[in-house]
Amino acid sequence: MTIAMTEFAPLATEIFLLVMACAILVIDVFLDDGRRMVSYVLSQSTLLIAALISWSLLDHPAAVVLNGTFVHDPLAALAKTSILLITFGAFVYSRSYLVERGIFRGEFYVLGLFAVLGMLVLVSAHSLLTLYLGLELLSLSLYALVAFNRDSVPASEAAMKYFVLGALASGMLLYGISMLYGATGSLDIAQVAAAIAAPDEKGIVLVFALCFIVVGLAFKFGAVPFHMWIPDVYDGAPTPVTLFIGSAPKIAAFAMTMRVLVEALGGLGPDWQQMLVILAVLSLAVGNVIAIAQTNIKRMLAYSTISHVGFLLLGLLAGTPEGYSAALFYAITYALTAIGGFGMIILLSRAGFEADRLEDFKGLSERSPWFAFMMLILMFSMAGVPPTVGFFAKLSVLQAVIHVDLLWLALAGVFFSIIGAYYYLRVVKLMYFDTAGAPVPLAVSTDLQIAVSVNSLAVLALGLFPGALLSVCTAVIG
């Protein structure tokens, strides 16, 4: 089998990222601790250039290359660009945190780049084997990142939990893929879809395969009842790692679901839509209700993530282009908001002190009115308060659900959003109406101040002018 060199053009982003990640890995070996900024700058430059390459491919026609294992289309280009830019922001937030704690090492950024590479492969997978390889590259990198701070017992414990549960979920996904291969005789997504569409392919084996695949996908999303790992991992991992896990991989998980459920298993739509209904309602209920009882803001945001996954699943289960574009818009805007929320925790932290308790935000308006306002924007967006982008993300998903005559699901989403508004507004109340016991002046690096400000203002700007991003999402889905 021969592969023409022109077929590698759609892989330009992945090839560049792989080469640079390997180069940074080698270069970092020869750097002493005083020159670790070289690895950081190279990693950030890599992400920006890769994002430009990916964005330049947005208008290129869809193409399936490498013997049907890799697909390039507008959805992949937008998702990859978003993942790369979100990761760029995550790396900016991480620098000051790692420096202050003496763990500013090149391995963090190399592992992050390989995790991003796994996400990009996942987004463009046109074979279930390619999809699994991308997923494992992402997962193995994240396991190592969670345990990155080797002196932290909670981080090591979180990494072990994540690894064991992640291996179990990966095994279920792989078992589902193997059953699907046995039933259809192919791992190619297009061929699997064609086989399922055949009148004689509605066997019980396909339903079992679908169940295992949905379980694997639900774990990667963190949907209830496969959410057990999220609170412990978010709480135990270093805050920059939590920030990374809670943002960009959600976009990759959305793309993976589109490839598997919509493109490959579209013929089983009525079956997986019913499963997603259950997952979405449980995620909305459990995430929003349990978050109320949290006093640790990282755990609160972990349960918040679960509730947002419920909203994302509402868009997917609608089963229409409107629903898919709304879910894509939701995934991108939530990732942007999430890195800002965790970035504020990093901003308030300092060496020997993790600002991961809700009470650590008391009186923030007195210490820094500007950053209190930035946090207010982020909390309002997560709660879905206009004019932030979170409101329009929720609105677009609810409209898609209503248009397929699932009004009760939309009402459930609104009901649990109202419950969720309580714990977001509680943070605002602590910042503006409570007084800190012994206020400590904020000592924040310039790049972190700029990152938080730009991040929060972008959330507000996208809320005021959501049409541009929403139209791009609609175009790439269409």
Image (cartoon, helix red, strand yellow):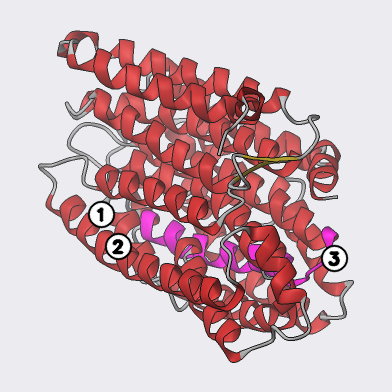
Residue type indicated by callout 1: Gly
Q: Residue 232 has which mark?
A: 2
Q: Residue 236 has which mark?
A: 1
Would you say residue 362 is visible in this rendering?
no
Q: Is the Cβ of the residue at disc 2 closer than 8 Å to that at disc 1?
A: yes
- Residue 338 screen position, x and y as percent: 52, 46
Name of the residue lying farthest toward the bottom: 204
Rendered residue at 23%/24% (across/down)? 104
Look at mark 3 in the image and give the residue it sits on: 399
Name of the residue lying farthest toward the front: 1
Residue type indicated by callout 2: Asp
- Residue 232 screen position, x and y as percent: 30, 62
Give the quadrant of residue 417: bottom right
Q: Tell me the magenta residue range.
A: 298-321
Of residues 207 and 2, which is closer to you in this image?
2
Would you say residue 275 is visible in this rendering?
yes
